[in-house]
């Protein structure tokens, strides 16, 4: 019996209507869930995922909101795809815009966490739903997020995947910290838990088709 979790997700750049019906709902729900998790972690104040630390640092130094900073940086990262010859999919475009807009929407209604217990709950729930959201959005197979695409593009040019991911996320973390982004126990929990959560949810949420459409294999555990 083939184990779906061990197979790379096939990216469909030009989906048919049937493929869209199967994939688009997972993609949209996944991106919204990721945004909810980011907003919960931001309101907890215990530390954000590496890229969100950078987005928060930018937001604190500019008139931009957290979501707007995410969108702007996502667009800039897409420019770096050009020399790497990466091709965006529908999921890539929706990732860039959708997560930022949804994050700001959730931040507008979520209160700041008050007290240790509430901060802990916000952090744990935030990390958990981000892991689930990543499984949904990657499992939809409609294109990687801009940051994942940059990672896989570097890997395709000979850099080990672990080195590309470590270098990119470490740079985002350090840059965000220098700009005033929040790093803490939430950041550590995200780094430890999300790869396992995403891997597990991919087993459940990856779209399975009798004859996969031609495309590139994509793996990732982030945006």
Image: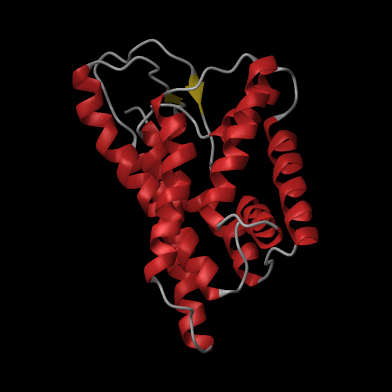
Q: Is residue 222 visible?
A: no
Q: Quadrant of residue 107?
A: bottom left
Q: Looking at the image, which residue is at 41% across and 66% down?
A: 108
Q: Position of residue 198 (x, y in %)?
A: 46, 47
Indicate whether 128 appears above or below 150.
below
Q: Looking at the image, which residue is at 60% across and 62% down?
A: 48
Indicate whether 83 appears above or below 2.
above
The answer to whether 165 appears left or right of 122 in the picture is right
Q: Position of residue 139 (x, y in %)?
A: 38, 35
Q: Is residue 15 visible?
A: yes
The answer to whether 153 appears left or right of 204 in the picture is right
The answer to whether 68 appears left or right of 108 in the picture is right
Total labels: the figure holds 0
Residue 92 or residue 170, whichever sits in front: 92
Q: Position of residue 197 (x, y in %)?
A: 46, 53
Residue 6 or residue 107, whichever sits in front: 107
Q: Looking at the image, which residue is at 58% across and 29% down?
A: 149
Q: Looking at the image, which residue is at 72% across and 34% down?
A: 164
Pick out the residue farthest to the bottom: 115
The answer to whether 189 appears left or right of 139 in the picture is right
Quadrant in which the N terminus appears:
top left
């Amino acid at each position: 019996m083939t184990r779906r979790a061990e197979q790379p997700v096939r990216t469909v750049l030009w989906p048919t209507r049937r493929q869209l019906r199967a994939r688009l709902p997972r993609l949209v729900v996944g991106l919204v869930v990721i945004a909810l998790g980011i907003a919960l972690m931001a309101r907890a104040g215990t530390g954000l995922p590496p890229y969100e630390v950078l987005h928060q640092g930018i937001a604190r130094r500019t008139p931009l909101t957290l979501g707007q900073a995410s969108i702007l940086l996502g667009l800039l990262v897409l420019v770096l795809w050009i020399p790497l010859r990466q091709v965006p999919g529908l999921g890539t475009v929706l990732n860039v815009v959708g997560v930022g807009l949804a994050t700001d929407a959730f931040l507008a209604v979520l209160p700041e966490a008050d007290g240790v217990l509430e901060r802990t709950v916000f952090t744990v729930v935030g990390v958990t739903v981000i892991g689930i959201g990543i499984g949904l959005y990657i499992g939809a197979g409609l294109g990687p997020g801009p940051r994942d695409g940059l990672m896989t593009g570097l890997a395709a040019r000979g850099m080990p995947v672990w080195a590309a991911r470590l270098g990119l996320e470490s740079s985002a973390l350090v840059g965000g910290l220098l700009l005033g982004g929040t790093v803490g126990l939430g950041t550590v929990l995200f780094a430890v838990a999300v790869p396992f959560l995403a891997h597990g949810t991919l087993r459940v949420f990856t779209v399975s088709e009798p004859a996969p459409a031609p495309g590139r294999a994509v793996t990732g555990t982030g945006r």
